Image (cartoon, rainbow, N blue to C red):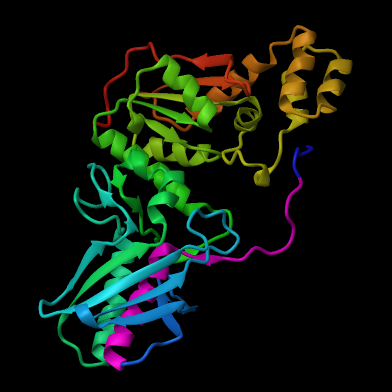
Amino acid sequence: MRTETTERTGPLRTGWTTGATATAAAVAAAHRLFAGHACTHVHLWLPRNRETDLSVHDCRLIEASHSAEAGLIKDAGDDPDATHGARVWTCIVLSDTEGVRFHAGAGVGTVTRAGLALAVGEPAINPVPREMLTTHLAHIAERFGYTGGFEVTIGIDNGEKIAENTMNGRLGIVGGLSILGTTGVVRPFSCSAYIASIHQGIDVARRNGCAHLAACTGSTSEAVVTAHYDLPDMALIEMGDFAGAVLKYLKRHPVARVTLVGGLGKFSKLAAGRLDLHSRAGGVDFEFLADLAGEGSADLKASIRAANTSLDALARAHAAGIPLAERVAEQAWRFAAGYLPPETALELWVIDKPGNILARAGTLTAPVAEIGQ
């Protein structure tokens, strides 16, 4: 197998979620209120028995409101995270009422649609980060003999602008980003935040009555499907390279109809049985495409193996009268359908770079039960 891209070698750095970063900022702010001076580092206890120290970027006392604010710079390691390098801040106000109450500051969104783990109207601070924050604030309160509660406001500098590059708008998270994380750790190229957004997108669509979802690899494939179907935005799932995240989640949380749309190169990987369609997981398998050519001559197969791109391989097969795009679509459909329950109708479209449909497989016309509502 030959890849179309070169892969990075060497170890990749892990990073820290927005939830872990906001928690450290909360501890630093609370420390400023209790101790009377700022700290430079915060020790965190993360889920799954992991610990770490995070550096505090800034911390200040806000005398007018009897509060303190601390900021940390989000470090996602070598993961391509939209929030990497952003300043995540937490403002702490002490309260006579016990417990912790959360608020969305500038750059953190508010939930406006049902289907997420949070109620409509709540700040988009997910359950695990809330638990981490509550636990750490209880620890520092005990350390300083404090018995009251906390008003916690979390913000992200420029978060509303950064959110334009995420799926938050379709999830019904308005005004900024989400505070995410289930382990506190960002593993390089796990793209856990992106996968979480895919799962949340499916949850929101199902909860709001969408029986037909379209999972697309990019903006061109999304434009193609919206030109054919009148689907609401929340029914459009931006799966990118994460076909596996979509298919595995739909297996557990099914809908009635699914349309998969993507380019020939990515869907040739799906046809070959790969759920991660990114080049880091391997390039187009030209040997596989040559095998799909089937009854083609040995010269044609050799030509396909020597192709530069998947579309180049397609052109060589087309010139020989071999319907390679149709075979990729059919094989990809079979593999994807194997992950879905039998009551889900699946269709798959293969497109080229301008957005022309090269091939289709499967159908949505068979009668299916309206499930997942």
On the image, the x and y values in percent for residue 263 come to 60, 26
The C terminus, quarter of image: top left
Say above or below: 192 vs 75. Answer: above
The residue range painted magenta reads 6-35
- Residue 22 in view (yes/no): yes
Residue 185 part of the magenta segment: no
On the image, the x and y values in percent for residue 109 come to 30, 53
Q: Quadrant of residue 237?
A: top left
The N terminus, quarter of image: top right
- Residue 291 in view (yes/no): no
**Outermost top residue:** 321
- Identify which residue is drawn at 42% across, 45% down: 164
- Identify which residue is drawn at 73% across, 25% down: 289
Say above or below: 229 vs 63. Answer: above
On the image, the x and y values in percent for residue 139 come to 29, 84
Left/right placement of residue 331 relative to residue 285 reads: left
Report the magenta stretch's main SS. Answer: helix
